[in-house]
Image (cartoon, rainbow, N blue to C red):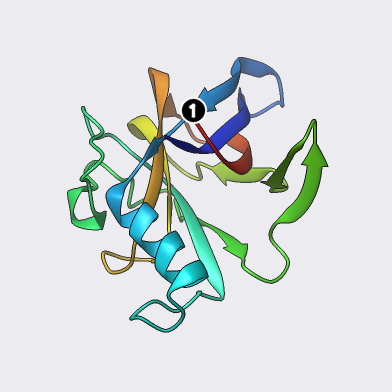
């Protein structure tokens, strides 16, 4: 099943030149993500609260599995300006109707390496938590392992839609 598509990934050098880009990468929809969405939408207050903030992060798990949880995240950068990018549940998503389907679109999320490099990174993930607690909703494996050097940016534009 698919939930998250990265519409575009752009890796730029410190001068803004494109080093690498790719479009339309699809996710692994995690079991925890399915639980979170179904409980939030259909089961009300059954232990799930819609957070005020969602988080997008980068990591280097060699294999992404449907059963992964936040504790499985490995190789997430921790230095040189890396922070999970935030999306407000109130204002971070825009709903659009596109060719008979609804989807949610984010603005570009930009990761910037400052004072050193981080990586390798192989995956982008969506979660409800800023640390190791919360629901790991989905992960998009990148086709190539990347290292982001000081001054470089790595940006994503994400859409979320229900479908296979």
Count the numbered circles shown. 1
Depicted 8 relative to depicted 17: above or below:
below
Q: Is residue 10 left or right of residue 91?
A: left
Q: Quadrant of residue 99?
A: top right
Residue positioned 61% across, 37% down in the render: 156
Residue 147: percent from left, percent from top? 40, 26
Q: Residues within 10 Å of mark 1 (few under 14, many from 20)?
A: some
Q: Among all residues in the image, which is located at the extreme bottom?
A: 45
Inspect this view and state whether residue 117 appears. no
Q: Position of residue 57 (x, y in %)?
A: 43, 48
Residue nearer the viewer, 32 or 64: 32
**Vertical relation: 7 (above or below) 41:** above
* Residue at point 34%, 33% (across, down): 119
Image check: 137 left or right of 161?
left
Q: Position of residue 6 (x, y in %)?
A: 57, 32
- The residue closer to the viewer here, 134 or 81, is 134
Q: Position of residue 134 (x, y in %)?
A: 33, 67
On the rendered image, what quadrant is the N terminus found in? top left
Location of mark 1 (residue): 26
Residue in the foreground of this view, choosing between 123 and 14: 123
Most foreground residue, 17 or 25: 25
At 62% across and 68% down in the image, what residue appears? 89
- Res. 91 in view: yes
- Look at the numbered disc 1 and give the secondary structure of its residue: strand
**At 59% from the left edge and 17% from the top edge, which residue is drawn?**
22
Is 12 on the left or on the right of 34, as rendered?
right
Asked if residue 111 lies left or right of residue 32, the reply is right
């Amino acid at each position: 099943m698919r939930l998250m598509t990265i519409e575009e990934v752009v890796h730029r050098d410190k001068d803004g030149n494109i080093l690498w880009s790719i479009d339309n990468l699809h996710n692994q929809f995690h079991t925890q993500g399915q639980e979170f969405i179904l409980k939030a939408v259909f089961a009300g207050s059954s232990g799930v609260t819609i957070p005020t903030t969602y988080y997008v992060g980068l990591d280097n798990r060699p294999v992404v599995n449907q059963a992964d949880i936040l504790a499985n995240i490995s190789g997430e950068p921790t230095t040189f300006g890396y922070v999970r990018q935030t999306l407000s549940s109130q204002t971070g998503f825009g709903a659009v109707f596109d060719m008979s389907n609804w989807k949610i679109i984010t603005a570009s999320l930009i990761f910037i390496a400052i004072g050193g490099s981080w990586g390798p990174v192989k995956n982008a993930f969506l979660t409800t938590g800023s640390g190791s607690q919360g629901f790991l909703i989905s992960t998009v494996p990148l086709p190539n392992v990347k290292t982001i050097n000081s001054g470089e940016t790595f940006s994503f534009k994400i859409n979320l839609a229900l479908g296979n």
